[in-house]
Image (cartoon, rainbow, N blue to C red):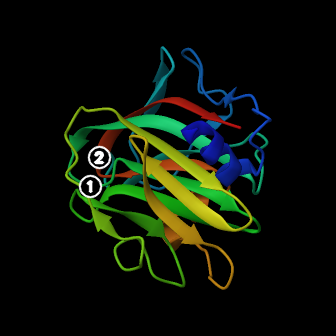
């Protein structure tokens, strides 16, 4: 029942079950490319795990393959290995715009979307604080429909942001992550199981 409700929310179709497409496998980055932020940490892949090493500020990757603009869901597992700031800055398309889900920002605990109506993840209605454990894997899922951006953490819905009548954007610093990207801030992180449908 829960899966049927989720599929209705994300795709509008309870009977159809779209197939997942993995975005990382083995020891190759594939279509993921390191972003030259300046002072960025090294990015590697091993056994299907993407590792983003701590940089001076931002480090990360962008996806250079095809990806939908709306009516999709993307999921991954991520963990903070070292550092005290955000270990998952997932930037994704939202129609003609883009948005970022931030986990562990602003000193370690802030979660939210950047940006909604010009306000970043620390200063809008999606803002919340979560006590993240170092080296613990967290399951993340983002669903983008024509009506909303819905986010789940460890299977629990944490964000349901309507799209109509709202301005969706990213902070200037992560524009290089568009259209789909992953970033960290002065933090080493690992990501695995990243896929979409």
Image location of residue 61, percent across then percent down: 54, 44
Q: What residue do we see at 72% from left, 42% from top?
A: 64
Q: What residue do we see at 50% from left, 36% from top?
A: 76
Q: Which residue is mark 2?
A: 187
SS state under label 1: loop
Sequence-first disc among 1 and 2: 1
Q: What distance separates the C-alpha of mark 1 from that of mark 2?
A: 6 Å
Q: Which residue is mark 1?
A: 85
Q: Is residue 123 above or below residue 74?
A: below
Image location of residue 15, percent across then percent down: 78, 36
Point out the image quarter for the C terminus. Answer: top right
Q: Is residue 89 above or below residue 96?
A: above
- Any part of residue 57 in sight: no
SS state under label 2: strand
Image location of residue 5, percent across then percent down: 62, 46
CA neighbours of label 1 inside 10 A, class few (<14), some (14 to 19), many (20+): many
**Image-based side of 22 in relation to 57, left or right:** right
- Of 22 and 149, nearer the camera is 149
**Image-based side of 134 in relation to 38, left or right:** left
- Of 2 and 184, nearer the camera is 2
- Any part of residue 122 in sight: yes
Marks 1 and 2 close (CB-CB < 8 Å): yes
């Amino acid at each position: 029942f829960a899966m049927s409700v989720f599929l209705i929310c994300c795709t509008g179709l309870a009977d159809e079950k779209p197939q997942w497409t993995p975005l990382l496998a083995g020891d190759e980055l594939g279509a993921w490319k390191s972003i030259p932020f300046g002072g960025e940490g090294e990015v590697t892949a091993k056994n299907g795990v993407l590792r983003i090493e701590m940089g001076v500020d931002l480090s990360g990757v962008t996806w250079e393959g095809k990806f939908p603009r709306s009516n999709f869901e993307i999921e991954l597992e991520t963990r903070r290995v070292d550092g005290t700031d955000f270990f998952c800055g997932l930037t994704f398309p939202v129609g003609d715009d883009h948005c970022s889900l931030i986990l562990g920002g602003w000193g370690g605990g802030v979660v939210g979307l950047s940006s909604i109506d010009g306000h970043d993840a620390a200063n809008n209605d999606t803002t919340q604080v979560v006590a993240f454990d170092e080296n613990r894997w967290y399951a993340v899922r983002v669903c983008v429909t024509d009506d909303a951006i819905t986010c789940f953490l460890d299977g629990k819905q944490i964000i349901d942001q309507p799209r109509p009548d709202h301005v969706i954007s990213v902070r200037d610093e992560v524009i290089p992550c568009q259209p789909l990207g992953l970033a960290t801030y002065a933090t080493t992180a690992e990501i695995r199981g990243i896929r979409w449908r």
